[in-house]
Image (cartoon, rainbow, N blue to C red):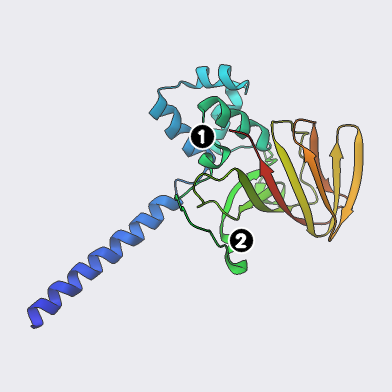
Amino acid sequence: MKRVWLLYSYHLSLITCLLIWYKITMATKNSPGKRITELCKTYSVSRETLAERSGVPLELIQRIEEGGAIPDLAPLVKISRALGVRLGTLLDDHEELGPVITRADSADETVRLITGLSSDSADPKREGLSFKALAADKNGRHMEPFVIDIEPQAEQKKSTHEGEEFIYVLSGSLAVEYGTERNVLNAGDSVYYDSIVPHRVVSADNKPVRILAVVYTPV
């Protein structure tokens, strides 16, 4: 009996170790750059071909793959379209068919990307927009919900890509630049717009802003 228990304990420990290894492995694979590299390798698509198909500069694709530099969502949308996959494919960890629930205390642990990075910044996290995915495990989704933290000094260029976006301001004061228009939104305000029009969101008063953003990109 003791021998059976020891054997059971050994197998249980082995399974536990494998599960921990799996989680660590999956956690290291969720960066868009790594996903792009994997997809290009799977589909035998070179960087040069990807740049030509997507219209994203070759240098930027290299920076995204190797350094994780992402100026905004637009290049990721264009790259995903060129590869024939959803934007979510570049952000996914798992494939869940049922509902996906993200608890409030775990949202900050799901940072998928930081945009607006400065190439010579000593602390890039203080200069970008931190995208925290809320449903990255949902299989086949067409919307991408994020909680986004916008730093006061974040420098975002205007972005343009296919699809639609919905933004709800959770805290702070947000400036939404859409085409030639500029509107200021405060906590509780929201906006819905077509992403094809050049747009960007920045802090309106040089203070941190937190928003809920839902991005839709057609497949």
Q: What x and y, as percent, mark residue 215?
A: 68, 44
Q: Nearer the viewer, mark 1 or mark 2?
A: 2
Q: What x and y, as percent, mark residue 57?
A: 62, 22
Q: Which residue is mark 1?
A: 66
Relative side of 185 to 69, left or right: right
Name the residue at 41% across, 25% down: 43
Q: Quadrant of the C terminus?
A: top right
Which of the two residues, 75 or 121, is positioned nearer the viewer here?
75
Q: In terms of sequence position, does the residue under pointer 1 or pointer 2 come before the other? A: 1
Q: Quadrant of residue 42?
A: top left
- Seen in the picture, residue 37 relative to 98 is either above or below; the reply is above
Relative side of 203 to 33, left or right: right
Which of the two residues, 96 or 134, is positioned nearer the viewer here?
96
Name the residue at 24% across, 69% down: 13
Q: What x and y, as percent, mark residue 71?
A: 68, 36
* Residue 123 in sight from this viewpoint: no
In the rendered structure, which amino acid carries the disc numbered 2? Asp
Dot 1 crowding, Cα within 10 Å, few <14, some 14–19, many 20+: few
Which numbered disc covers residue 108? 2
Q: Secondary structure at mark 2?
A: helix
Q: What x and y, as percent, mark residue 104?
A: 62, 67
Name the residue at 86% across, 47% down: 175
Q: Quadrant of the N terminus?
A: bottom left
* Residue 2 in sight from this viewpoint: yes
Relative side of 208 to 9, left or right: right
Q: Secondary structure at mark 1?
A: helix
In the rendered structure, which amino acid carries the disc numbered 1? Glu
Which of the two residues, 182 or 207, is positioned nearer the viewer here?
182
Relative side of 5 to 100, left or right: left
